[in-house]
Amino acid sequence: MIGRVRFAFLTVVETLLRVLPFPCKTGLIKIGNPGRDAPVFLTCNFRLTVERVRRALKGMDAYLLVANSKGVNVWCAATGGLFTNHDVVSVLRTSGIEALVDHRRVILPQLAATGIESRVVRRKTGWNVVWGPVYAASIPAFFHGGMKKTASMRTVRFPWTERLEMAVSWAFPISLLCLAVYPFWKDGVLPLVGFVWAWSFLVFMSFPLYERYLKRDSKNVGFVFFDFGQRGLPLLLWVLFLAGLAGWSLTKGDFSWPLALRWGIGSLVVVLIFGLDLTGSTPLYKSGLHEDRLLRIVLDTGLCKGAADCERVCPVDVFEVDSARRMATLPRQDQCVQCGACIVQCPLDALRFRGPKGDEVLPETVRRFKLNLIGTRKAPPRPAEEEHDRSG
Amino acid sequence: MSTYVLMRILESAPGRYDLGMRILTLGRLDRAYDRLAGRIGQGHRVLDIGCGTGALTLRAARRGATVKGIDINAEMLEIARRRISAAGLGERVELSEAGVAELDGEEAQQYDVVMSGLCFSELSDDETAYALKEAARLLRPGGLLLLADEIRPRGFLRRSMHWLARLPLAALTYAVTQQTTRAAVDLPGNMARAGFTILSLRTNLLGSFGEFVAQKQGGDS
């Protein structure tokens, strides 16, 4: 009972404040009565994730390792460079797990594949990485099904529960900002907050209705029903608002600075909401914010030997390995969300990103330089030798 | 020392780390590092755990030691690499992107000194215990362990004062970086369990920052 209340409380708080990390203790957690051949699962130290994985493992006898992802969820942390090989190696080595089990097989969440290199972990520790399912809830089925993943276990979805979470985690921080107008515009707070919540719910809950109008392979930005450029849409909205203000003042003849200020705040909230990166907020579409960063996955068929790592880690089911030709194919390439997991894991470096201008992002870059908050990879720091070469 | 939470802001931009640290600590950290590095002599073999931008590594190399620096942050290491080659000490320093759990390839008892500045406070309990055991394994008998780090003040009053002083800074840091630091866990106890004798411990007024000089048991010097 207490456990359930605690879990509900955590879920609410960490959904409202989803934009912030919630770290919890790293290390080893025993589930049931694990023996020397018990499975070893590993996850990040975002508190809500740990609680969800524990609940999914209930009834099993297993070990759960919690690695340091700085309190951020698996996918974001691994893709953003906060959850790295070092963190996985560290928990495998320092938690004491090596003395407790006879095998060396650790099951990682599949979404960690954008940042954790299974080969590096094996080389440094001797542990073999098995990519588990995307969702913790599928762990029992995955484990009892002989650790085989069905297509649905490897694919991200965007069910109503997640859309609800997304709506709340959008609306809550923006409503906090709205509260800031209270000192000089008391009456404005409720309508603004109400608008923010209503709009967020409308946008995310009606997702299935308009999803088919979303385009996967072109710019797809701002508010979903229109195809304005990201800079164009907010500008256009501002113009509309200014015209509205001018119209109001002219017809009513009562222009005042407080009115203009309130008008400005109201329009800011609307523009903020309309300008949010909707497709980028879903796990199914790539961000539409930067047309120049819309990358495609390309396969070097000369290098591919059909190892199928790409198929195992792709969260949107882009790949199919043709076992007869021992070659990967990309029948659903248009579904790619640019996470880069396939590039990071390919043992033969046969995959890479190609930009709209033909520029390429090589596997080494995807592995070493993670995405920052605004979606760019940090410029590679130059090793000293290279610097020397350049000057010479 | 309460300002160490701001370390996080600086760490998120490694380029600003050193200048920022100097301002925040009003030179205190520099002096602590100088005092610790004073224990290092010509020809010593030194391991710097969590070398960051190389503050301790550079000091040790300047004193004529051969240093290996490890850190898991590639960007910080890159800055360290530049500073070391600018100081002309590249010959004496080896830098490696590795964490404390990745030292098993290192031969036992090969170092005279193992040192670490502001790194143990980033480690979990498990990692702290593991790192100190590794330090003991890698040091020759009688070798020195030099640590400078944020520690938990002793006594309720000091702890409360420290907590209050730290609160606004911690809040600011969390707001900017969504990260926080914490004090290193029970360093004296962990050191004793790993086989170290503490020779000297110097703390600041609030007892929230400590400089440890410890010796691996089983030798005189």
Image (cartoon, coloured by chain):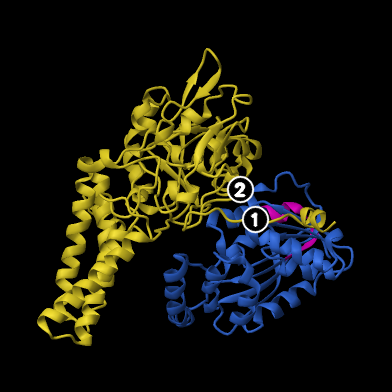
Q: Residue at x 26, y 76 (%)?
A: A264
Amino acid at dot 1: Ala
Judging by colour alone, the chain drawn in yellow in this rendered image is A
Residue sitting nearer the eye, A383 or A359: A359
Disc number for residue B157 = none
Q: CA distance from mark 1 to mark 2?
A: 9 Å
> Are circles 1 and 2 on residues that touch, CB within 8 Å?
yes
Direction right: furthest residue: B43
Nearer to us in this view, B25 or A284: A284
Between B189 and B131, the one lying in front of the other is: B131
Q: Residue at x 47, y 72 (%)?
A: B173
Q: Which chain is blue?
A: B
Q: Which residues are magenta?
A: B134-145
Residue B64 percent across, percent down from the top left: 87, 67
Q: Horizontally, is A362 left or right of A169 in the view?
A: right
Q: Quadrant of residue A88?
A: top right
Which residue in the structure is indicated by mark 2? A368
**Residue flagged by tag 2: what amino acid is it?**
Arg
